[in-house]
Amino acid sequence: MSENVSFMLSEKGKQLLVLNNFKFFKHHTSKKNEITWRCVINLSVVQNHASDSTLNRQQISNACKRKAVDSIVENPSKIIRKEVSNYANEGDLIAPDLKLIARNIHNARMHCFPKLPTSRKEVHEILSLLDIKTNRDIEIAMHQAVFEIFPETELFGCRFHLGQAWYRKIQNLGYAPQFNSSNDDVGKWLVHIFGLPFLNPEEVAECFTEYFMADKPENAAITEFCDYLVDNYISNESIFPPKMWARQCSDRVHTTNACESFHSDFNSNFYHQHPNIFKIIEILKLFQVNTYIKIRTTINNPKPKISKKYAEKEDFINEKISDYRTSKINKYDYVKLLSYRNKPHKI
């Protein structure tokens, strides 16, 4: 039987000998310069344990960590794609392996980051040097471009960004403290507004007029917020009518997180507005390696695993939708209950 001998580096950068998927570290060097190797698993002298099935992932992970530390500005996903594409046995990897490698890269780079500020003065000095730029109303331009090329397109807004827009308006009116307080009546009314996206589009205007306006706090700022909602979101003639953001479902795909993540990752690989065509093809090939791994993972495990947090959230929303459809709760109570599941975090 032929023996496959190779070398690799450990997580601490030490040389390891690999023999038939068993790892050995340098134990002793004699006066005659003879090297004694010992198994990294401290069992008996006889090699009676199973071979290391994670060896392939460890080799790629160690190579990625060295590259990540040497080139601190290079995108981790780009490093992973390059190393995986250069590795002969990339077919052994699945999506969870890529997540572990990405985590190892993050941990390795943590030691390269500068120290955090140690005083308030130092924090303010750092903040004063930041050059902050903000782009606004880009969604409207994007919508116009889509309709120009694809006139029959049906657009549906992202619940996350809708909540951000509403919360920013609340901040501008100076009511963020009340919104984030659990004991303030005005804050509770503002939070309940965020349950409107769980209604059907034709129910939004009726619910807002019949319940929210009747229960509205007598306040000039709240009146301004209501006018803002009607002019931009509630009215069918508004810029973003209810048919673009209201739907009675618990589906998590009503966000653009996946699209934005891909666009950000893909865009980070280019440093010029008009890159060379061969560079584009090279990047696409690297992305395709990652795509093959995801497809293979989907075939082996068709049902994606979601976190317990999201599973509980979906179950709660579906339960309240069922209660509303069977008239166990009225429309206003339904909106108020689901509003807390759509409440945005502090921005």
Image (cartoon, grey):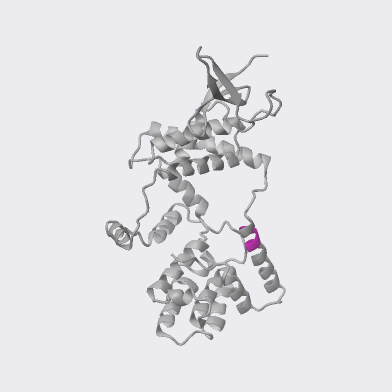
> Residue 253, can we see it?
yes
As drawn, is 207 to the left or to the right of 273? right
Q: Tell me residue 344's x, y (percent).
A: 50, 66
Going 63% across and 31% down the picture, which residue do you hit? 41
Q: Indicate the quadrant containing the C terminus: top left, top right, bottom left or bottom right.
A: bottom left
As drawn, is 273 to the left or to the right of 314? left
Q: Tell me residue 167's x, y (percent).
A: 45, 70
Q: Is residue 16 above or below residue 345?
A: above
List the single residue furthest toward the top.
Answer: 32
Q: Is residue 268 above or below residue 149?
A: above
List the single residue furthest toward the bottom.
Answer: 218
List the single residue furthest toward the front.
Answer: 31
Q: Tell me residue 239's x, y (percent).
A: 43, 68
Q: Main secondary structure of the magenta part?
A: helix
Q: Indicate the quadrant containing the N terminus: top left, top right, bottom left or bottom right.
A: top right
Q: Is residue 45 above or below residue 336?
A: above
> Which of the pair 20/96 is nearer the observer?
20
> Which of the pair 29/135 is nearer the observer?
29
Residue 285 belongs to the span the image colors magenta: no
Q: Is residue 315 above or below residue 29?
A: below
Specify start and end residues of the magenta stretch as a single range.
310-314
Going 54% across and 21% down the picture, which residue do you hit? 28
Residue 317, quarter of picture: bottom right
> Which of the pair 318/182 is nearer the observer?
182
As drawn, is 249 to the left or to the right of 63? right
Q: How many marks?
A: 0
Going 50% across and 84% down the picture, which residue do you hit? 216
Q: Tell me residue 326's x, y (percent).
A: 72, 73
> Residue 286, can we see it?
no
